[in-house]
Amino acid sequence: MKEFKVENHEPSILPDGEWKLVWSDEFDGESLDKTKWNFRRHMFHKEHPCWIEDEGLSFENSNIHFKLVEKDGKFYSCQLQTGENWMDRPSDVERWPIAELKTPKFEHKFGYYECRCKLQKGDNWWSAFWLQSPTIGCHIDEKKAGVEVDILESFFGNTYLPHNLHFGGYGKNYKFDTTKENKKGCVAEDSIPVDD
């Protein structure tokens, strides 16, 4: 392992080999850098009722904070992405034509990815760090459609789920693998406690 120096920040710890930084965001500003990030608002072509833009975000000491926003007894939060999944693009039609394709703000096939974060303390949030192909789920062959790589997900306070892989489409041909010995799926019993 070796250190990669990041000016005015903690260094990154990289595996041995030749690595170069191609994308980063240290959240040094007072607002979200929208040349790097989009807000995720849709799931399966429909607007998700609980996902919002800009509200609940704050920036302090090179950290971005996500907070739940309550409106009329309902809770909302932001989700960030650098691109979009073909199924999650907005569309008001159920058949042809499919929603407009947009160029991702960042797309990369291979590499080393790092995220430093603190997870939520309460339950029923969805904190996640994923890698996902823009065409995941559009073909049963993962060599053509890509794989969803869940590096980290958390649904329950101070716990996280280990690496998960989703491939083969999201229908009858769906396949799943995980780093956990228990391969039943993403359930609360599979969560790992986080030390504060």
Image: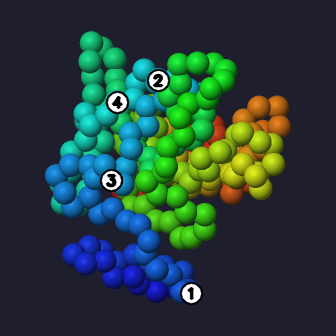
Q: Disc 1 to disc 3, how far (Cα)? A: 30 Å
Residue 117 vertical placement versus 114 (above, below)? above
Tell me which label, 4 or 1, sits earlier in the chain. 1
| Label whose residue precedes the other's in the sequence (4 or 2) | 2
Amino acid residing under circle 3: Thr
Mark 3 and mark 2 in contact (Cβ < 8 Å)? no
Q: Which mark is residue 35?
A: 3
Q: CA distance from mark 2 to mark 3?
A: 22 Å
Image quarter of residue 115:
bottom left
The structure residue drawn at horizontal position 46% and vertical position 86%, both measured from the top left corner, is: 2
Residue type at tag 1: Gly
Indicate the position of residue 126 as horizontal and vertical percent values.
46, 38
181 left or right, relative to 103: right
What is the distance, in whole Å, between disc 1 and disc 2 at their CAs?
A: 42 Å
Mark 4, Cα crowd under 10 Å, few <14 / some 14-19 / many 20+, is some
Residue denoted by label 4: 52
Mark found first going from the N terminus, 2 or 3: 3
* Image point (77%, 42%), residue name: 139
The residue sitting at the top extreme is 72
Which mark lies nearer to you, 2 or 3? 3
Q: Amino acid at mark 2?
A: Glu
52 sits left or right of 125 in the view: left
Q: Amino acid at mark 4?
A: Ile
Tag 1 residue: 17
Tell me the CA gap for discs 4 and 2: 10 Å
- Residue mark closest to the camera, 3 vs 4: 3
